Amino acid sequence: MTNLSPHLRQATPVVAVRGEGVHLYGEDGRRYLDFTAGIGVTSTGHCHPRVVAAAQEQVATLIHGQYTTVMHRPLQQLVAELGEVLPAGLDSLFFTNSGSEAVEAALRLARQATGRPNIVVCHGGFHGRTVAAASMTTSGTRFRSGFAPLMPGVVVTPFPAAYRYGWDEDTATRFALQELDYVLQTISSPADTAAVVVEPVLGEGGYVPATRAFMEGLRERADRHGFLLVMDEVQTGVGRTGRFWGHEHFGVAPDILVTAKGLASGFPLSGIAASEELMSRAWPGSQGGTYGANAVACAAAVATLRTVGEERLVENAEAMGKRLRAGLEEVAAEHSCIGDVRGLGLMLASEFVTEDGRPAPEIAARVQQAAIEEGLLLLLCGAWNNVVRMIPALVIDEAGVDEGLRAWSAAVRAGVSGR
């Protein structure tokens, strides 16, 4: 009998047969509130009618129009739609399939455009599982162990993770920037540094937001030393944080922006954006791919972007995120094992710790499993898997938030008690 790899373990026992909005329906007939959104992918919810209609229409006309062979209308429409929401000056796009591929495309562009070898990444960042992306990932050894040697030329600098250090944000930010300067003085000279790559909010690293001063410091150093600033918006983009792009919270624009996940509401699509001048410095033949900018995925992405705008889903993410965070903080106030509640918009997490402040992955796992019994689907993250994250679809309303909070409160009580 043939089976999936034993390492593809599902976080829940649910066999999903249907999805609608913020809910999944299991083969057992039960309805589940999905606060995973396919790891932040189903931005407009499961099977949004506009996305379904766009995909169905496209499937019936052209499924695969390989975009270095022919051009197709959905890709042209997507370029135009993204132009309305991209930071000023980022007017050139390259598309591929997964977040990892897009990160590696950004890496390749940065090295080719600058002629410099090294990439600086932030401690706790997640950028993918392919060799170069895994070499840039430091959110957990499980993503990079066992297939060394990894790609050389990657240097790690601290991220202002205030809770982890036990400091306030200002202290953590000063430390992170001072250490970056030390890295540039001792490991990777500015003349050897092609780019700094950063997530506006650490994803797999525990849902830790950056700070404005840290992002401003990165921008200032990139400008001063002539290297590039790359924002990995794979998880934070397309409205997830209550702004269309996560970096908008910090008033700092990137030289290269990486996007994926919520861009096409579940269809595989990713890409990078840069200025036309910067993108033109990529070497001939360095950009391409068989399935990149698939016509059906592009049609779904166009429908996604239009839905996000017309249904004001970015604004909804901000409002519902505030409501959800307030409820999470109320639950945390009742349980000392929740050491921190953090995040931006609808990208929120609760970190579980022991009485002396050490990571408590066993409690987090019990709570996550208890939530399933309450009809709520959640995922873990963080270096020790002691952080429970919540990333519902951007279409969630007050009733959905409140339903989730009731289930969360019950799950925490059950998980903490060991039931």
Image: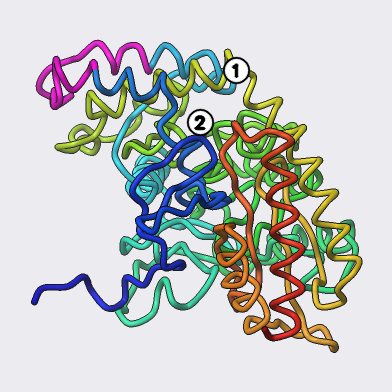
Pick the front one: 308 or 16: 16
Give the residue at the far front of this rendering.
29
Which residue is labeled 2 in the image? 44
Q: Which residues are magenta?
A: 57-78
Q: Quadrant of the N terminus?
A: bottom left
Using the numbered discs, state the Cα–Cα distance from disc 1 to disc 2 in whole angstroms: 10 Å
Asked if the residue under mark 2 is in contact with the one under mark 1, i.e. CB atoms within 8 Å, the reply is yes
Q: Quadrant of the C terminus?
A: bottom right
Drawn side of residue 146 relative to residue 118, left or right: left
Vertical relation: 197 (above or below) 349: above
Quadrant of the rendered image containing residue 53: top left
Which residue is labeled 1 in the image? 311
- x, y (%) of residue 301? 39, 25
Residue sitting at 42 percent across and 43 percent down?
110
Query: What crowding class fits label 1: few (fewer than 14 Cα within 10 Å), some (14-19), or many (20 or more)?
Result: some
Vertical relation: 299 (above or below) 351: above
- x, y (%) of residue 382? 61, 69
Quadrant of the rendered image containing residue 251: top right
